[in-house]
Image (cartoon, rainbow, N blue to C red):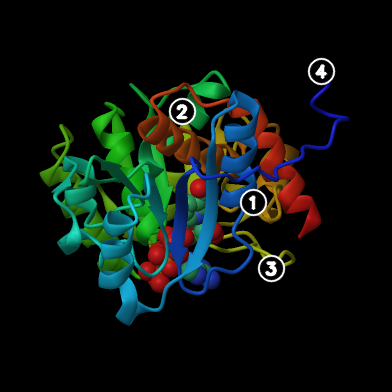
Amino acid sequence: MNLTTMRLDTAVDINGETQIAGVIAWPVGHSLSPPMHNAAFKHLGLNWAYAAFEVPPDRVKQAIAGLRGLQMRGLNVTIPHKAAVVEYLDEVSEIAQILDAVNTITNVEGHLTGYNTDGPGFLRAVAEVGEEVTGKRVTVIGAGGAARAVAVAVARADAEELTILNRTASRAVQLSELVTQHSPLAAVPALGLDAPEAAEAVRSADILIDCTPVGMHPHEDVPPVVPAGWLTGHQLVCDLTYNPRETVLLQAARQVGARTLDGTGMLVHQGAIAFERWTGQEAPVAIMRQALLEGLDRG
Ligand code: NAP
């Protein structure tokens, strides 16, 4: 089967035995998770379906009670509910506790467990392009939710050095403290993007990871989060933004001969890990990626 020319049918047949999973968000917007997971269920012949639920903040408690009461098999959790769900779960994984953010809930016979698959998803995306963070000098730009997940994962995967740059320097310092508390790294330099040492922190990185929304649709034409002149050809430059796939930073990286990794890799793999936790089956990553890319193309 040629995945590049065949268009996926992600609609599922629902009957009396269909198992239900989904995502809660507010607003739910154009979530790409339903096509991605439904394509995977269909491909593996699983009688499961995945739906998106728009849940306002004052209904989070009821939503989790609904997951239990309706015996749904699992949920993804996204902005703004990742911290709010924690108090309604029976168990929360160590990483989700450290981050105070759950993006995946499993329901195993009424026992709800919260996980965070963002960091592991990022590491799998890096592995998929034949790289690894272990033993590398890594610079993370950003100190928001995505940066927290990625920085903790990178540090716990034994990066040799990690530096955090952020527009607001105090938030970089907070993230640095979190990372040093929960990883083997004894020191994690934290700098404002406007600090004199920021250019060197970018230039000397083996792996640079932009965890900011700079360059995200509809603001594709802004300057990159760091000057293009700071990038070098020996680097792997990653951008977590997935719309557009090639952000202004990745364009600049390509032009200096650096390897690049766009945000679709992390998005697919955080979903694949959730899928595996719910179903116990290996996720069909190629199918999930195709559904995601088709969803992105549709806009
Ligand atoms: P967030 O919590 O709001 O954090 C945003 C971060 O970006 C903050 O550190 C903020 O700095 C910085 N920032 C925002 N605007 C900036 C600007 N103009 N210049 C410099 N820095 C700026 O957001 P998030 O949830 O972490 O998401 C960040 C990006 O990652 C988004 O594009 C999101 O789509 C993407 N993401 C991708 C995946 C994936 O699976 N690929 C998963 C999660 C998120 P301050 O602290 O100074 O405000």
Measure how far apart labels 1 and 3 are at the Cα level: 10 Å
Mark 1 lies on a secondary structure that is helix
Name the kind of residue labelled 1 in the image. Leu
From the image, tell me which residue sits under label 2.
Answer: 124
Q: Which of 283 and 186 is in front in this view?
A: 283
Left or right: where 299 falls relative to 29: right
Residue 119 seen in render: yes
Q: Which of marks 1 and 4 is nearer the N terminus?
A: 4
Of marks 1 and 3, which one's residue comes earlier in the chain? 3
Label 3 CA crowd tier, 10 Å (few <14, some 14–19, many 20+): few
Q: How much space separates mark 3 and mark 2, taking CA atoms?
A: 29 Å
Report the Cα–Cα distance between label 1 and label 2. Answer: 21 Å
Assess whether mark 4 and mark 2 are in contact (beta carbons under 8 angstroms).
Answer: no
Q: Crowding near pointer 2: few (<14 within 10 Å), some, many (20+)?
A: many
Circle 3: residue type: Val
Disc nearest the viewer among 4 and 3: 4
Ligand 1 within 8 Å of disc 4? The answer is no
Dot placed on the residue nearer the N-terminal end, 2 or 4 = 4
State whether label 3 is within 8 Å of ligand 1. yes
Q: Residue at the right extreme?
A: 5
Which sits earlier in the primary sequence, circle 1 or circle 2?
Answer: 2
Label 1 to label 4: alpha-carbon separation:
34 Å
How far apart are the alpha carbons under marks 4 and 3?
40 Å
The mark closer to the camera, 2 or 4, is 4
Task: Tell which tag, 1 or 2, sits nearer the viewer.
Answer: 2
Q: Residue 222 carries which label?
A: 3
Q: Which amino acid does label 4 sit on?
A: Met
Q: Which mark identifies residue 1?
A: 4
Q: Name the residue under label 1.
A: 249
